[in-house]
Amino acid sequence: MLVLTNFSDQTQTALLDKTLVGAGETLICNYDPRSKMEASVELHPYEALAFLYSF
């Protein structure tokens, strides 16, 4: 499954429907190209499941 989210570099959070994402699935964060920040998303309730994307 592919889940697209919007990354806010102001709040440094990603918004997504957490019920759609499970272990081993792919998460992609859209981010503001003007920002050089990294998007880090921790998914609950899947314990210790985190994705880090460097742009």
Image: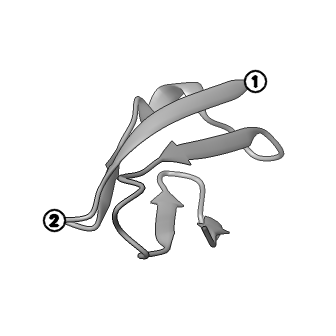
Amino acid on which disc 1 is placed: Met
Compared across the picture, whether 33 is left or right of 48 comes to left
Label 2 crowd bin: few (<14), some (14–19), many (20+), radius 10 Å: few
Residue 13: percent from the left, percent from the top?
29, 60
Say the numbered circle drawn on residue 1.
1
Which residue is at 62% across, 43% downward? 28
Write down the residue under mark 2: 10
Amino acid on which disc 2 is placed: Gln
Residue 53: percent from the left, percent from the top?
63, 66
> Considering the numbered disc 2 on the image, is that residue within a helix, a strand or a loop?
loop
Image: 24 above or below 37: above
Compared across the picture, whether 48 is left or right of 43 comes to right
First-in-chain label (2 vs 1): 1
Q: Nearer the viewer, mark 2 or mark 1?
A: 2
Image quadrant where one finds the N terminus: top right
Which residue is at 47% across, 53% downward? 44
Q: Residue furthest front?
A: 34
Front in this rendered view, residue 11 or 25: 11
The Cα atoms of the two marked residues, 2 and 1, are separated by 27 Å
